[in-house]
Amino acid sequence: LITDNLCDDCKEHFHKVQEYLTAIGIPFTLDPRLVRGLDYYTNTAFEIMYAPLGAQSTVCGGGRYDGLIEEVGGPSTPGIGFAIGMERLLLTLKEQGLLPPVEKKQPVFIVALGDAAKTKAFELQQQLHEKGLYAEIDLLGRSMKGQMKSANKLHADYTVIIGEDELAAGEAQVRNMASKEQVSVPLDGIVAYMETHKKG
């Protein structure tokens, strides 16, 4: 077994790892037949498993690879790494009731007509995102009618309409989708307007 053939330094390191895990209450099982990329791992390799997943129970695996960077031509660099299977992680969290509830937010939908308006819409979307506001834009080149349908499908609470006339005037039409009220807002004031009016 590999655990019967450790040098003194590796044996001491291995015992220390187990000691630290025990100290913080993490249960573990020693598995001398663990199969990972042992050609580049040094010291400890590990897997984190969740038995209720069955045959595909490994959620995460990794270990130390202090010699890997040097082996591929870099400087001597100690390292540790791991990979997580995202689907298995989500299944594990779901099984334990640990997935956070999904908050359904209503987006601001930016309707853009024409290339210049699309550029402005993209810029505005980023500005809204930076303020923590959910915003969507059309990516399929649809007509205004098609974009408004998308806004309705996404349950947008506001639409911001930008066309050539709006760009020339330096403003956009902002429509409250519930009340159908529509107002003109300066383009450089859209973000502040949304911060004031949006609730979700």
Image: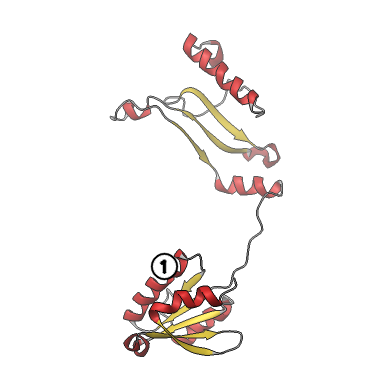
Quarter holding the N terminus is: top right
Residue 40 location (% of width, % of height): 41, 26
Does residue 179 appear to the left or right of 43 in the view shown? right
Q: From what the image shows, is residue 38 above or below residue 87?
A: above
Q: From what the image shows, is residue 6 above or below residue 27?
A: above
Quarter holding the C terminus is: bottom right
Q: Residue at x 39, y 76 (%)?
A: 121
Residue 46 location (% of width, % of height): 55, 29
In the foreground, 100 or 191: 191
Residue 34 location (% of width, % of height): 56, 25
Residue 89 location (% of width, % of height): 60, 45
Q: Residue at x 53, y 80 (%)?
A: 158
Q: Residue furthest left?
A: 73
Residue wearing tag 1: 126
In the foreground, 126 or 198: 198
| Crowding near the residue tagged with mark 1, few <14, some 14–19, many ≥20 C-alpha atoms within 10 Å | some
- The colour scheme applied to this rendered structure is secondary structure
Q: From what the image shows, is residue 18 above or below residue 6?
A: below
Total labels: the figure holds 1
Q: Residue at x 46, y 66 (%)?
A: 129
Secondary structure under tag 1 reads helix
Q: Residue at x 52, y 69 (%)?
A: 134
